[in-house]
Image (cartoon, rainbow, N blue to C red):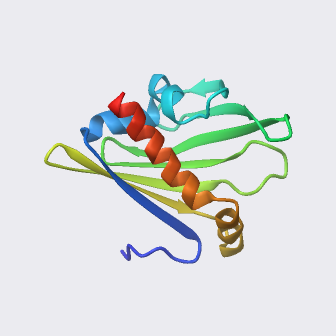
Amino acid sequence: MNDAPDDREIVVSRRFDAPRELIFAAFTEREHIEQWWIPPGATIEAWEGGAEGSWRYNMTGPDGRPMPFKIRYIERDEPGRLVYEYGADIPDGPSPVRTTVTFDEQGGKTDVTLRLRFATAAEREQAIKHGARGGAKQALNGLAAYLEG
């Protein structure tokens, strides 16, 4: 498999000083997700746990209106790999982004790689213009702060 991103992907990575079981749990368990994934002031509206579960959260947009999002787990190979779809939970919204997360532990540290795959190259370019790469890095920074706290 080629690890270089193609014209539909964004790839970001970060090393954490934590075991991969804990980091995997941070991506899949509500009590962790509420502490780092969702923005301050956002609320989880629905939670269906399990291997192919899903959850929804609402945040307030810049215009003051609610912005709903949905995450649907597709594949869970605990603790090494997780695949989920993430996107706006609105009628006729953009296609969800399929994200593959790998958790590679070495010497008590875990390398986490997010591979965001968009439906089209044009959607990827639009997402980049709106800060998707920075947002993915910011999410991993938020996870690091949560794990250190």
**Position of residue 22 in the picture relative to residue 33 (left or right):** left
Instruction: Classify the position of the N terminus by image quarter.
Output: bottom left
Q: Nearer the viewer, residue 96 or 32?
A: 32
In x, y percent, where is residue 14? Answer: 36, 54
**Position of residue 67 in the picture relative to residue 47 (left or right):** right
**Position of residue 16 in the picture relative to residue 69 (left or right):** left
**Position of residue 80 in the picture relative to residue 92 (left or right):** left
Of all residues, the one furthest to the left in this rendering is 107
Q: Nearer the viewer, residue 60 or 51?
A: 60
Q: Quick check: 5 above or below 91? A: below
Q: Quadrant of residue 132?
A: bottom right
In x, y percent, where is residue 120? Answer: 67, 71
Q: Residue at x 26, y 38 (%)?
A: 18
Q: Residue at x 65, y 68 (%)?
A: 124
In x, y percent, where is residue 96? Answer: 67, 53
Q: Residue at x 70, y 60 (%)?
A: 130
In x, y percent, where is residue 55? Answer: 61, 32
Q: Count all numbered tags in the image, as a single digit.
A: 0
Instruction: Classify the position of the C terminus by image quarter.
Output: top left
